[in-house]
Image (tube, grey):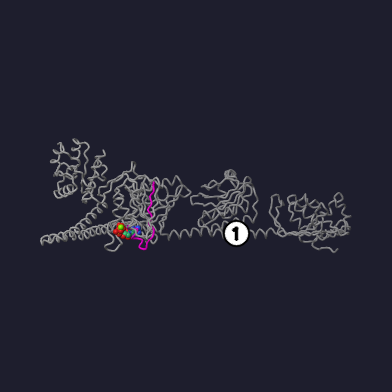
Amino acid sequence: MSSVPIFDFSPASGALLFLRGGGACAQLIERQDWSATPLGPIDQWPQCLTSALSLVLRSRLPMVLMWGQGGVMLYNDAYSNFAGSRHPESLGSYVRESWPEVAAFNDTVIKAVLSGETPNYHDQEMTLLRNGAPEQVWMDLDYSAVCDAEGNPAGVICILSETTERVAAQRRSAFLLALSDDLRSLRTPAEITSLAAARIGELLDASRVFYAEITSTGMMTVERDYARSVGSIAGVHSLASFGPDLLAAYRNGAPVVVYDIPADERLSAAARDGLSAREVGAFIDVVLFEEEQWVGLLAVQNATPRVWNEAEQMLVQEVAERVKAAIERARAERDRLWDLSQDMLARADFAGMMSAVNPAWTRVLGWSENDLLTRGYASLMHPEDRPGSLDVIGQMALSREPVRFENRIAAHDGGWKTIEWIVAPEPDGINFVAVGRDLTDAKAREAELETAQEALRQSQKMEAIGQLTGGIAHDFNNMLTGIIGSLDLIQRNIAAGRLDRVDRYIDAGNASAQRAAALTARLLAFGRRQSLDLRVTDINTLVCGMSDLLERTLGEQTALETHFKADLWPASTDTNQLESALLNLCINARDAMPDGGKLIIETDNIHLDERYTRAYPDLQPGEYVVLSVSDTGIGMSPSIVEKVFEPFFTTKPVGQGTGLGLSMIYGFTRQSGGHVRIYSELGLGTTVKLFVPRAHGETETVQRGSPEYPMGLGETVMVVEDDPSVRLIITEVLKDLQYNALELPDAAAAIPLLQSDERIDLLVTDVGLPGMNGRQLAEIARETRPGLNVLFITGYAPNATTRSGFLDEGMGMLTKPFAADTLATKVREMLIRETSV
Ligand code: ADP
Ligand code: MG
């Protein structure tokens, strides 16, 4: 073998020529006594071992030979550098013992190679203890066998190259790239610093990482920190506690790196104690400057002493720079927002002053920035709003939760602006930020809208009244024309002695007068001024009794369906009015179904609870009987439904609709303590529901007027009425019906007769008499004639909403105007009642 000139080395024995040119490791091998090892004395080493070793020793690549099953290690100088403090003890030792931290790995590899495999690894990660501390390394490893003379594997040769630096650099740049990407999307310094802290903490396996803001007053604010298995130190700290040496080091600008805090002389005793108390054993601090001003500190800490390698230190430095850049970008964006915002933004303190306001303040209020920053914010608040607003701010100081409120703020021109505020406390417990939105315009628009709506309501009301009076005047004119015309004709005919046609004119005049009477009745019903005769009524029976009439009204094209609720509650209602309401509903339904359809009348019991009745001021919660009428007709649009209860509202051609049907129903149901609802959909149909209050008591059967006048049986009826013509008509009708009638103008005249022995079977009296009224007269009459039945006659009873309160047992009521048959029926009814008593 030829010598290698770079090594000035000659073996002691000429026999060990294979070691020649093998460097420092060759010398060590030569000097070692191998006779006691599994390899045996060196001069007896097999040819295969010496050739392989010679190759290893002369290579400049780190190479190691692991001989035999035990893996006795023989390596070259390049490897000895790699092995660090393990060398030279490891030379000639068993590999599994020398590198216990990777024993399992080596064991697998040696077995694999000795059984014929040639494994290799690229960037294999390992943690090695080469210099006392664990170290993460990456390596390319290439293994092959050294075979003996028989061709059997006798040892393993390994060529290795450490790639730690390259891999670490790649990882670092990948980490930084990802970090930069992720920081870009963050908006606030707090988000930026906490993300960076967590990332670097995980990468370096640090126990605590934080970014601190340094204020000009020498305080360090840690808003949040990344802390693993140690406590958080979020809060405000004084820089003075670091001690002058450390502060000087920070101000110097270079990263401050400490491996072992208790042992580091650069730190003052107080600083060391302080750091140990916070579970810091080692740290890297990178300081950040903004134009000479120290503004921030990125701290990476380990709970126990730790050697930070150069790569780690560089990484922290680079992260710190990226964090600083990201914060600056976020601040710039915030500043842009600050300047451009339409909303008023401010930073203020709980003591009452503002420390920053954005330009929107001046735009909205007219005050200069200086005005705003030099006077307390409370002085800007409207005196009425001040206590409330300061209260809310005070509460926020305690709760540390953002709050929202509204108040009026003084403008420079002397006016007030309504501002909606959102305020949120800052972590320092001293300041808060406020965002204010000017609501003045919105409020003004609201007020305008309110005025416009009020005007609209007013005009709608006027329109309704106009329609009402116009309608009444129109209808009455028609009717009066009929009456006046007829009277005129009668007069002229009588004057001319032509009596044959008088009857016809009387009929015509009568018909007009009847229509006028019906109209006033409806108007009174709408005005809820009619007097109702409330009785306990079975509505099922009432509907049944009308079905013939309804079927005739509806005609053949429309089917009538009834769904009666079994066990329907008795209802309290005026049967005549309810019948007329039902008839009206059916006529409306028929009109809505010109081509026929289906009409359904349903009854039901229902309980209306407070939640339902709340929306209707006059409606009481409780039990109601529902009578609903549904059709499959044309339906109504919502705007029509809104109007149908207005008197004279009709969509029907002149002569067909009066527009009084539903308004009368509305007035009647409301007056009787009930309620009416309409559900309608265009093209599908309409349902009208009448809610009639439930009655408690026995159902009464009402005698209905029959077409023939029920005749009298010679009974004596006393008639007290101040209007001579009405009195005349009543007595004439009674005499016609074969009653004996006593005519008296007032109570004063009637009382002596009532107190006499004169036969009197029934008292018929006007309610509104001059002097003593009819009701009082009835009282006096009953003093001497306790069982006497009384029939009152009235125009309307303004004070008596319903007759039931006014009428005692054996009393009845008849409303003017009335027809002769009604009087006949009513008088008969009253007399029958008496005989049955
Ligand atoms: P009139 O029947 O004289 O028009 P109403 O007060 O009874 O007066 O009804 C007012 C208006 O309500 C009707 O003109 C009609 O437009 C509408 N209306 C009432 N009932 C129905 C119904 N069942 N289907 C469709 N529209 C109806
Ligand atoms: Mg109608």
Q: Is residue 804 left or right of residue 567?
A: left
Q: Quadrant of residue 639?
A: bottom left
- Position of residue 217 measured from the top left corner of the image (x, y, whole percent): 48, 50
* Rendering quarter of residue 413: bottom left
Position of 168 compared to 328: left or right? right
Residue 698 on image: x %, y %: 33, 41
User: Type of residue at label 1?
Assistant: Leu
Residue 657 or 734: which is nearer the viewer?
734
Task: Give 10 or 447, whichever is nearer the viewer.
Answer: 447
Viewer-side residue, 695 vs 75? 695
Q: Is residue 604 magenta?
A: yes
Check residue 425 for magenta coloring.
Answer: no
Can you identify the residue that label 1 sits on? 176
Residue 233 visible in the displayed image: yes
Percent position of residue 758, x then y: 15, 38
> What's the magenta region?
587-606
Q: Quadrant of ligand 2?
A: bottom left
Quarter of the picture holding the C terminus = top left
Q: Quadrant of residue 17?
A: bottom right
Callout 1: helix, strand or loop? helix
Residue 347 or residue 769, whichever sits in front: 769
Q: Residues within 10 Å of mark 1 (few under 14, many from 20)?
A: some
Image spot of residue 513 (x, y percent)? 20, 56
Quadrant showing the N terminus: bottom right
Q: Is residue 808 shown to the viewer in this render?
A: no
Task: Please state the total of marks drawn on the protein image.
Answer: 1
Decide if ligand 1 comes within 8 Å of the CB at mark 1.
no
Q: Is residue 123 left or right of residue 118?
A: left
